[in-house]
Amino acid sequence: MAKPEKQAAIVEITDRFRASNAAVLTEYRGLTVAQLTTLRRSIAANATYAVVKNTLTSIAARNAGITVLDGDLNGPTAIAFVTGDPVEAAKGLRDFAKANPALVIKGGVLDGKALTADEVRQLADLEPREVLLAKLAGAMKANLNKAAYLFVAPLSQAARTIDALRAKVEEGQGGAAAPEPAEADAES
């Protein structure tokens, strides 16, 4: 590759690193072009998948402020640059790797922190962001309902106590209701 072409490739990879919130390194040796196309389509909603040269990627990663990938940049490497949900992208890669054992997840980076291959698999095991947010909202709603019940409980308890006292007073008067104030004034 000529020097200007290498510089352009470095700039492009650097821009991809900066635009993505995560990147997953894989080894694709043994996959056919058709399988790689299938993989690209399966993760297209959350990531772009590119075959890269290790030396250019190493330089581009350093330019983007990522220094944790150097150990994983050996052998044929392709990177999934994740711009969408990292969990969904990791699930797509994990599921494809299960169906196609030639795809090997080497590791990655998430928000500037290194991920091992096992951590990428753990990330794939998480529930989607929307599900986690729904669970959080449900937990918050349950806590608000408990708080509302606790605030209302003393009032309802006081109302029941007053009602019980009123019933006891009525029983003590032989069941006769207390005269109205207007009737009491008319009799005097």
Image (spheres, rainbow, N blue to C red):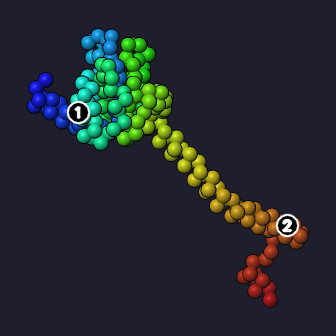
Residue tagged 1:
13
Residue at the spot 32% in from the left edge and 39% down from the top edge: 66
Q: What residue type is labelled 1?
A: Ile
Disc 2 on helix, strand or loop?
helix
Q: Which of the two residues, 184 or 139, is positioned nearer the viewer here? A: 139
Numbered disc 1: secondary structure: helix
Read off the residue under disc 2.
Answer: 168
Q: How crowded is mark 2: few (under 14 residues within 10 Å), some or many (20 or more)?
A: few
Residue 25 position within the rendered picture, expressed as x and y whole percent measured from the top left: 35, 26
Q: How far across and how far down the image is residue 41, in percent?
A: 29, 21
Q: Is residue 86 left or right of residue 187?
A: left
Residue 180 can be seen, yes or no: yes
Quadrant position of residue 43: top left
- Crowd class of label 1 (few under 14; some 14 to 19; many from 20; radius 10 Å): many
Q: Residue at x 24, y 34 (%)?
A: 59
Q: Which of marks 2 and 1 is nearer the N terminus?
A: 1
Report the disc number at residue 169: none
Q: Can residue 50 be seen in this view?
A: no
Residue nearest the viewer, comparing 143 with 64:
64
Judge whether 46 appears above or below 159 on screen.
above
